[in-house]
Amino acid sequence: MTAATHSPLFPQTPDTADAVLEGLDPEQREVATALHGPVCVLAGAGTGKTRAITHRIAYGVRAGILQPSSVLAVTFTNRAAGEMRGRLRQLGAGGVQARTFHSAALRQLQYFWPKAIGGPMPRLVDRKIQLVADAAAACRIRLDRGELRDVTGEIEWCKVTQTVPADYPFAAVKAGRETPRDPAEIAQLYSAYEDVKRDRAVIDFEDVLLLTVAVLQDRQDVADQVRSQYQHFVVDEYQDVSPLQQRLLELWLGDRDNLCVVGDASQTIYSFTGATPDHLLDFRTRHPGATVVKLVRDYRSTPQVVHLANGLLAQARGRAADHRLELISQRAPGPEPVYAEYPDEPAEAEGAARRIRELMASGVRASEIAVLFRTNSQSETYEQALADAGVPYQLRGAERFFDRPEVRKAGIALRAAARFGGNDSLLDDAVDLPSQVRAVLSGEGWTTEPPAGSGAVRERWESLAALVNLAQDFSAARPGATLSDLVAELDERAGAQHAPTVEGVTLASLHSAKGLEWDVVFLVGVAEGMMPITYAKTDEQIEEERRLLYVGVTRARQHLHVSWALSRSPGGRANRRPSRFLDGLRPGSASTTAGRAAAGGPGGVERGFTSRPGVTPRRRQRTVARCRVCGRTLTDAGEMKLMRCEDCPSDMDEGLYERLREWRAVQAQRSGQPAYCVFTDKTLMAIAEAAPDDEGELTRIPGVGRRKLNRYGADVLAICAGQEPGGEEVED
């Protein structure tokens, strides 16, 4: 068996069409060989749906039944489209178009604009918020930042559901939407937003779909040309299709039925954006002769994780629940899910960080661990806890891998070496592709052994090491590959944001975790008010929250930790309860309201976290955090740390802030950790604004806990007093 056989990223290309089918289970094979007419694949989490549909396309191409250029595969993220293109290339079907709905529509719109509309095409804007703010100003309506974000979301919902401004008030009531402002005001803002765009000759992402639909509807010659190009369509994540995307798909198809859709109604978690599972659930009604295949063999998760996932859906109600898939794990048994209760959120975060350190010490890689939460505002507590524990982490949705400075520089160096490698003495002794890459990247800071600690130097090394590992996998799959071939692969991955793995625990919201998986998953904050979220009022909204938790559970391959906190902050009122979704599933709970009031039970539940040793929890009413400048209620975690709105005037001592930053850099260097592990920028700003005189004032600043007070308090107070740590006066 060759090394390439073991490479998960770059498997060997099958020699024949029949070889494409090897290794598929009976249901996946049925999908792969169903090449004609409408096909509906109902695929549960972890059942290999991407494998099934990419092998379907590749089998059709390799068997001569499908022409690569006649196939259009669409999905919902650039990452998923990039992964699909990569798999198709490895299966010998590299000419197939795999794109997002927006990417495919934009390509067509740009091509047909001169013919169908004429003149220059309007500029595409990345973000709507500033345009919405300008529209609000034109209407003399004042919106704060939260309202700006919410109104922008309403405008996006209108466009994907094809709702015009005049119809918004009625449509919002019918859909049961919680509107951030009076519906009539939002309709006015929506209309003004469209005027602003028109005046500035710009379009947004939803316009790309709307304009493409309009062109295909109005110009039969354009529609005929598109349909002659694309004969076969595959749609992944079909449960997430919006009415506008469905309309575009229908126009692409025309009167043909060569369509394969793949989805799972139990993973519908984006209805707030206009997504609906109705198109998936109604597929057999629209296409009575459709081939329907169910994928229920779960290759991702252990039977214990699958049992919990099935249990969650067994309690569900509604149309999507009526079509739920009962998963059957194909993996060996693993540990039972662990349930943990904590007195407050910081204790919950510290507990997760402590357990993560234990897992890493036992050999689990940081990149195989994830902490998933309901809202992005929960992230900061876990960032702080992991930083305090010295655990490296990466934020899902933060700086992209290919945008990192060290990765950009490495790409330039590899491209130069590929072009002028014959004149580079570094490559003289490099006999194969991996050794060539190691030789080039050694000049960028890569070494055979990682640097000590977990600071910025280690982070840069991890990025370069990910490129080295990628080169090894690429070379194993393509033994004759050159440096130029690898550079082309990197360019392809950069375009799709298909990054190699970077070591670090992943912090992500449940929504952004869709489509990903880890060996170990921590589901945190699984309490009433957060899961389901407080503003989920209707039965449909509650059920979507249940599906969101189901998505979180099914991200775990082996270890699953579920936790909740009884109060938000230390000493706060312990009035929270575990999520109702866990009733009857976690040990010691019953599937009743009375059971929900019980605090856990034996077997699989970590107990004893409800109070700290020697400390009697104080019960006090939680105070509302308000800006100390304007008095506005604060909800953003960063603003709460500053104790003021981001936009309110700061009375920060700039000199003090710079001295604190210099001191922090020294501390970080000594400990071999990133600077934020000492104190985050927001905490330093808060200290520089408060200039505390004693420990009492210092501990009132969010981000300065007892551990950091003991470790750094004397130094910080000395700096605030105008002294060097150690007692010497600072010269002005």
Image: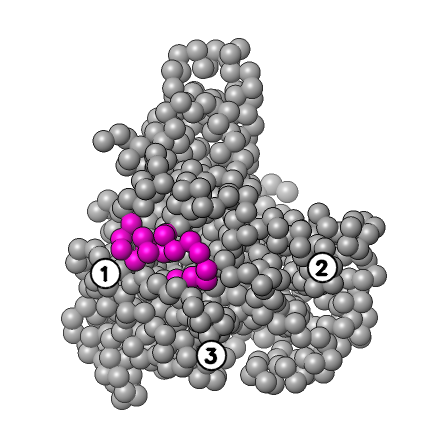
Type of amino acid at the residue the image marks with label 2: Gln
- Looking at the picture, how far across and down is residue 732, in whole percent? 64, 42
93 is higher (above) or lower (below) than 521: above
**Marks 3/1: CA–CA distance:** 29 Å
Residue to which mark 3 is pinned: 541
Q: Is 74 rendered above or below residue 270?
A: above
Q: CA distance from mark 1 to mark 2?
A: 49 Å
- Residue extent of the magenta highlight: 24-42
Q: Position of residue 651 (x, y in %)?
A: 65, 60
Q: Secondary structure at mark 2?
A: helix
Decide which of 425, 39 is in the foreground and name it. 39
**Distance CA(mark 2)–CA(mark 3):** 40 Å
Secondary element type, mark 3: helix
What residue is disc 2 on?
220
Q: Is residue 676 visible?
A: no
Which of pointers 1 and 2 indicates the residue nearer the eye?
Answer: 2
Tell me, yes or no, whether the two marked residues, 2 and 3, touch with CB atoms within 8 Å: no
Task: Give the x, y percent position of residue 478.
Answer: 39, 28
Choose between 190 and 476: the one closer to the eye.
476
Sequence-first disc among 2 and 3 = 2
Residue topped by disc 1: 329
Residue located at (57% from left, 60% from top): 253
The type of residue carrying mark 3 is Gln
Residue nearest the observer in this picture, 699 or 8: 8
Instruction: Tell me the quarter of the image containing the N terminus.
Output: top left
Does residue 503 sit above or below 356 in this rendering?
above
- Kindly identify the residue that appears in the image at 32 percent across and 37 percent down: 7
Question: Looking at the picture, which amino acid does disc 1 mark?
Answer: Ser
